[in-house]
Each structure stands twice: as structure tokens, then as C-alpha cells.
Image: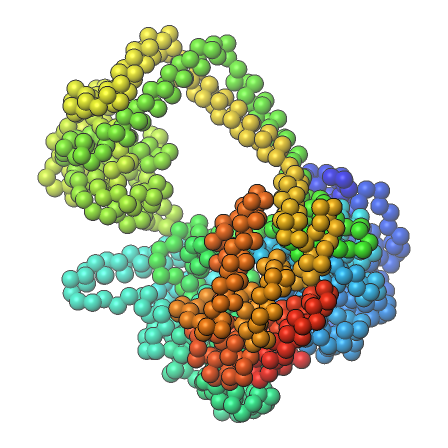
Amino acid sequence: MEVASNISKRKASGRESENQTAPCDDPSKVESVPKKRNLSRTCIHEVAVPHNYTSLNDESIHGTLYDPVYNRKMAKTYPFELDPFQSVSVACLERKESVLVSAHTSAGKTAIAEYAVAMSFRDKQRVIYTSPLKALSNQKYRELSQEFSDVGLMTGDVTLAPNASCLVMTTEILRGMLYRGSEVIKEVAWVIFDEIHYMKDRERGVVWEETIIFLPPAIKMVFLSATMSNATEFAEWICKLHKQPCHVVYTDFRPTPLQHYVFPMGGAGLYLVVDEHEQFKEDNFMKLQETFTKQKSQADGNRSGGPKTSARIAKGGSASGNSDIYKIVKMIMERKFQPVIIFSFSRRECEQHAMSMAKLDFNTQDEKVIVEQVFRNAVFCLSEEDRTLPAIELMLPLLQRGIAVHHSGLLPIIKELVELLFQEGLVKALFATETFAMGLNMPAKTVVFTSVKKWDGDTNRYIGSGEYIQMSGRAGRRGKDERGICVIMIDEKMEMSVLKDMVLGKPAPLVSTFRLSYYSILNLMSRAEGQFTAEHVIRNSFHQFQYEKALPEMAQKISRLEKEATLLDSSGEAELAEYHNLCLDIAQFEKKIISEIIRPERVLLYLVPGRLVKVRDGVTEWGWGVVVNVVKRPPAPSGTLPSALAASRSINYIVDILLQCSLVSNENGSRQKPCPPRPGEKGEMHVIPVPLPLLAGLSSIRIAIPPDLRPPEARQTVLLAVHELGKRYPQGLPKLHPVKDMGIEEPEIVDLVRRVEELEQKLCAHPLHKSAQSEQHLKWYQRKAELNHEIQQLKSKMRESQLQKFRDELKNRSRVLKMLGHINADGVLQLKGRAACLIDTGDELLVTELMFNGTFNDLDHHQVAALASCFIPCDKSNEQIHLRSELAKPLQQLQDAARRIAEIQRDCKLDINVEEYVESTIRPYLMDVIYCWSKGASFAEVIEMTDIFEGSIIRLARRLDEFLNQLRAAAHAVGETNLEEKFAAGSESLRRGIMFANSLYL
């Protein structure tokens, strides 16, 4: 590291604190302080300090770097006693040093942000508060405005008091200000980054990274984060980057402890699996698993007796009062465990669940009156026509009963209304998606998970511990509840380890998602000062820092492996190598032979009951088994054999084989996936369906098998017979000869068989073949070969500089910019590049291409707005897109331009799939909707034109307005007056009605 970090860890509990370790120059040598989770108000304090740093703070007032305290009048007082992590954080702020606060949701991080704002007001300095989402910025603006007088807001579509002392903004706005050298930045002393763990977001994470890199070193930062496992590493990056100390205050203390229950779908009770002391209840988990076994046996018994009801049908939220969700919500209300948040991973499911609560009513008559009053006041700002929209009218009866829905597809006004009612205790059961767990502190007594799996765009996976921590953190209201309650609904058996990892797992580390964008490259080229270049950003990224930090560890591992390899040196290495190579050659040829002989037309004749066959599943050796039957059918369901079987679904032949399986069942008490016995374990025989390609050998031996293999004794007889054969043939069972026994005459196979026989003769004649130590020596040699391979891989990884990779990518992207005319041969920004610098909402290359190739010139402002909507990310419609003629041609021009740009990027050696680029960049799902809205259609009319949620349409329209304003600025920058007027008219045509109704927070 260029700047070494002195890391000190201390554990603060109550008002006392003590240094646990001495300052150390090597972060890797710092031992973690043992933590007792949730049992005391413990926090851990660390600090990364640059080399030769001298603090100018008075120790009598501020303590030391490693033990900060504050002994003067505070900038803000609180009506409660601060927790240790809050006290330590405040002391760090008063030292005028950056701090990262990593704590659970609801732990009280907001108090620290508010203190930084209060301190700035006291010291007459400016402070910027950034949040990842516009909605959160609006909420935070309202919250801060209630306490501080001089607060402004900048979110791209709303600007209020831009010269205020405290500015709330999205991170993108701050990055834009830094790129353009805004004068405001020169007056800022503090920047607060809320939800900094957003930095690992695949799409937008780079915005945080660039913003932190560009901030002047004089500015100090406050980072608020959910718990993350590598907070120290992040602080070291800040320390190295800005040559200033960065404190880490970490706590996993929950002010309100949690109890975690599991509800099995179709069952009738809750099972406490993790108590408030974070102890896992294994006995309860086993009882939970038994309920699924009982359900399965009942289902099997009912299979012939008519239709059976499925837990999954109930899960769908049918309107009957018998669904599992209904039962749980009713039980929660009866036990006075409300308010409750019921999390689903599907917006449609949220709404279905809420509608299935028709029989439940949680509000008193007085509360109903208040809800109606708040509702009427909220929608009063809408036109009379918009107030009668079904999405608004249908919500009132639900809200009056204390039930609500919250997801990104709702009308913004309804979403905000739900948040306000929930905060006031007028919503008792809230059906929400995981986005509700972000941002403002809105806790409940109980949280319910309707599923433990979510679709992430690629797979249907279990939710990670970080996601679970974020959502479950909403359970338990500080000062109101003794403990929070989490209920997890599951509809199938779950591995104990999976549940443990989810509920008790460590928070995920913050990993850089840094990437180079054309927007960033062009803006860096356009900066007048020239102090930042793309090279500077790459070199100082968190991505590069993490890579460089891993290098010493890699070097140590190489050294360790080389040492081990040296110890394995033996005198007869040449002889061992020869013997080892003979074994490898034989194995390779046999593999080719077996792949030929197991073709159905050759092998089916020999796969008769009783035939001994060898089975190999990837790297898993099953050994010899006995053929029972062969059937032509699709493979068995997933879960019968692990790994490679999943890839063999296209195979038509399945061989039922008696194989020796492990007696050890999985942790959850079941044996869903059989596995071979471990060394020394007896195991037992089971019939396993095996796809034909997993056969690795056929023996010439056949044995008699009992006609009924259901009794365990019958299968045990076969197992004894196989063991007996193993003893009789210690060198291996005789194999079916492809030529002599199977009559295969193809010259290639005959040649392969001949070569194997020759190699086997050489092997038998080798001096090591019958040597007592040969097996041990061979194991040593194989281990050494593995070590050498691993050493070479690590060395190759160390040589592959991440810096060089990014440099190569930068070179390729610069070639693209030259070919498209954004920069000249000397890398100087041209007119086109100046326009692209101002566009970060849509694809900057594609949209400037349309501006300069005349596509926009031939369109009116309604068509321009419709075409520009294709650049804004939105939900995918399931309906067929039928575009009117005035939109079809512009869309075709857009697709052609996108294809050309993708091809240029591919020619410049960038890894781009042309069709994927076109599809992911152009989203024409709301072209018609925007066109009609721009021409004056009502909101009721346009929502009938698509199956996309109303809230998603409004979100797109607001982002489109922001995008059109960026295009207007770009047209102005290059002197295109006609285009500038057209983009302005397009923006103006959108800004009306419910689409642009004011936020209730403003």
C-alpha cells in the first residue's frame, strides 16, 4: 500500500472503552476483537491512518485517534442516551475526521447523520446529504426540514432552495456537480453518503466510487451502511485516497432483539428456530421437517383419491379465508403482534395477498375517519378525473381496514400516503416488496416472509443473509417492543445449513463494481483543470485497491505451496512421472472407448438385469453397481443425483442401477440427494435412475438379483455379492471387451483397444507396478503435480494486472469515440463529445448519434418524446407491441443506429453482442403510452394501453422529463436551437396531471 494504515480496534460497551490492540502497520495482522452478538450494547471502533499523520486535536477535548471522546457542548442534544456506537461516531465527527458507521437497520444511524448536519450549521459550513433514490431524498428532505431551517433538495426532477446550507440530493446529482466543477462544492465541509452499501449495485455502484474519488481532500465524509464484513478495507481505501484518517464504527447490536419463526406451508403452527440470543433451535427445526414428511405421506395416500389441495395454491393468496397468509395475518392480529410487514418478491403477489384479507378489519371507527381524512387531503391535489382512477378509489376501503400495499408499481402519491399512514400506526398490515426495507426507518413489530426464494433475473435463488438482515431489521420497534418477530414461510424442506446461513449468516462484503463508461471518459476529457484523468480514476478505484490488497496474500500462498511442493521431492521422480503418465494415458484412451461403446445402438443389448456397471458423476466416483432395468424416458427429477445429472436432461435412456449409498442423511434429516458412502462406511443399496452417459465401465460379470428389491434384506444380499467379487478380483473386475465380447469392428475403436492393451502391458512391466510403496509414491507425485498447477495459476493471476485490463479497455473505448467523432486523433473533445458529456440518463453514444444524423429533425416533439422513452429502463411488457406508423419508422432508425454503434464497439475489441446490445438499450414498451400522453390523452386512457404498473409508467415519465432536459442542454451546448426547442416542447407536453403530482413529502 502506498499509504499504510494504522488500525486500532477497541470494543466500547456502555460508557467505558479500552484499547484491545496496539496500533499496527499491517492491517492483516490485526486480530478481531471477540464479539458477543446482541447480548450487550457493544461496538467496535477502528481507524485507518496515513503514514506520518499527526493529529492537531486537543486530547483533553477530543481524546486520541484510537480512543475518540468529546468533552464539550454538543452541536445537538438527543432526548435519549446515545448508544456507544453513536457516542463514538459523534466523537469522530467532532474531531473533523471521516467516519463509516456500519450498523443494522433500525440501530440509529440517522442520529449520526443529523449530528453531522447540526455540526455544519453550528460551524457555519455547508453539508450535502446524498441518498441512492429520489424517493428517499424526498423523505430525507422532509425529515431534515422539520428539524433544520435551511434545507434544499436536488433530485433531477425537483430543485428546492439550491443555495441552502444543507442540500439533500441523489448521488448522481453530486457526481454531475463534481464533473462540472460546481462552485457549491468549494463551500462544502461534509458529505453524508446514506446507504453506502449501494456501491455494490451492478448498474449504479460506479457512481458512488467516482463521486468519492472526485471529492476534494478537504471535504470530510460520513458513510452510513448496513452491516458489512469488510468495513475496515473500505476505510483503508478512503485513507489512501484522500490522505486523511477514516474511522470505522461497527456494531451488530440490535436495540430490539429478534425471534425467528418458521411456518411450514399447509401446516398449522409456528416453530421458533432462532431465539432472541441468536441460538439456533435444532430440535424445533427437526420437528418442522417432520411436518413436511407427514404432509408428503398424506399426499401419497391421497394420490388415488381425487384432487389434493396444494400449499402452493394457498400461497397464491386466493380470496378464500383459508390461505396460509390469511391464517398468519389473522393469528398476528389475535396475538396483538401488529403492525406487521408481509414481504413478497412479486408486486402482483403483494396485491393478491392484500386482496385476500377481505374478511379482516384492523382499524376502529375513529381510525377509519382519520384515514379517510388523510386520504382525501392527499388526493386533493389531483384533478377530479384522476381522483376517480381505480388505482386510487380501490385503495381507500383497504386503507380504512388498516391494510395496505407498498411496491414500486404503485402510484407515487398512494405509495407516499401508505408510508405516512404506516408511520402514524393507521396501517396495521402492510404487504410490501423488499424496496420497503430501504431508507427511512419504518419499523413494525412483526415481519413475515412469504417466500425464501426470489428471482434475481438469472435464477430462482434463496435470499442472501444481507437481504434477510435488511428486511428482518424492520421487525422490532425501539422503546415499544421487547422483541421483534420474524416469520419465515417455507413450502418445502430446507437444508438446516441454508436456513442458518440466511438467518445467522455474516453480512456480505462490499465489493467494487467499477466499470468504465463513455460518459465518465468524455467528462474527464472535458475537465478544464485536467487534474483527473481516466487513468487516475482507474488507479484510485476501490476495485484496484481491493486487487492490490489481495496481492500479498496471493504471494504468501504461492510461497506456502512452493514450500509444500519442495517437501514432496523424492529421488525417483523421473520413474514416478513415467508411471503416472502411463496411468493417465490409459485413463484417457479408456474414456474415449467408453464414450463409443455406451451409444444406445451398441450398449442396450448388454445392459441386462444383473450386469455390473461402473458409474461416475463428474468427479464423484460411485464404483460398481448392478443393472436392474433400462427405460426410454425423460431423466428423473432434479434431486435424484447431484451435479452432472442436471445437464443430462436431453438423454432419452435411463438405467436403473442398484448403487451403494451413504447411510448418513442430510442435516435436515432427509436424503433427497443420495451420495456414495464415505471411506470405511458400509452404506446400503438403493435403486438410482442414472442417465446413460454417466456409465464409466461395463463388466463382463453378471449376477442374479432378487425379483423384489423393496425389502432392505434383498438389496443387502446384492451388496454382499458385489463386495465378494471385489475381493475375488483385487486388480479390478474383468471388463466387457469391445471387440471380442461386443463385436465392435470400427477401425478407430479397434485401434484404441490395441493401444490400451499395449500401455497396460508396459504398466505391468514397470518396476513401480508391484512395489509396495508405489501407491504412496504415486499419491505424493499427484499431489506435487496439483500444487505446481495451483502455483502456476496464482502466478498468472498476479501477472494479470487489473490496471492493465482497464487501460486496454480505455484504449478500445477511446478508439470507439474517435470512430464516432466524439474526440479527434489527439484525444481532444469535439462537438459531438461535448453533447454526450451532458447525458447520463440514456445511452450517450446512441442518443448523440440520433441528434447528429438528423433522426430527431424529422420528428415532431410528440414523436421525439416517444422515441426518447426507449432509452429509459422500464418494466418489460408481456403484450405484443403494435406501433402506429408515425412511431414505427423512428424506432427502426433507432435500432439501425444501435446496431451500427454495437458493431463499431465490437470491431474495436470490446466484448459486445450486437443483438443483446440493441435489445438491452432500446425498450419500446411505452412508446405508444408516452406519445398519447404527450398529445393530451388522460391517464385513465393511457393505462388501458399497457399491462405495465401505473407507478412504473409515472416513474418512466419523470425520468424521461429529466432525460429530455439533458438533451435540451446538450443541443444548447452544440448550438442546435431547433432541437433545443423540440426537446423543451417534448418535456413540457409531459408535465401535467397525476404524472407530475407533487410529492407529499415536499
Q: Is residue 81 above or below residue 566?
A: below
**Res. 833 visible in picture:** yes
Q: Is residue 720 above or below residue 122?
A: above
Number of numbered tags placed on the structure image: 0
Where residue 537 appears, as percent x and y from the top left, is 71, 48
Q: Which residue of the protein is positioned furthest toward the left in this rendering?
A: 707
Residue at (52, 63) in percent of width and height: 893
Where residue 358 appears, as percent x and y from the top left, is 39, 82
Where residue 266 appears, as percent x and y from the top left, is 32, 66
Residue at (79, 74) in percent of width and height: 164
User: Quick check: 247 left or right of 470?
Assistant: right
Where residue 601 appears, as percent x and y from the top left, is 18, 34
User: Quick check: 165 left or right of 172?
Assistant: right
User: Quick check: 559 left or right of 975?
Assistant: left
**Res. 47 visible in picture:** no
- Which quarter of the rendered picture does the N terminus lie within? top right
Residue at (33, 32) in percent of width and height: 621
Residue at (82, 65) in percent of width and height: 183
Q: Residue 360 occupies which quadrant of the picture?
A: bottom left
The foreground one among 127 and 860 is: 860
Colour scheme of the picture: rainbow
The foreground one among 90 and 929 is: 929
Q: Is residue 78 above or below residue 455?
A: below
- Which quarter of the rendered picture does the C terminus lie within? bottom right
User: Quick check: 141 left or right of 586?
Assistant: right
Q: Residue 146 occupies which quadrant of the picture?
A: bottom right
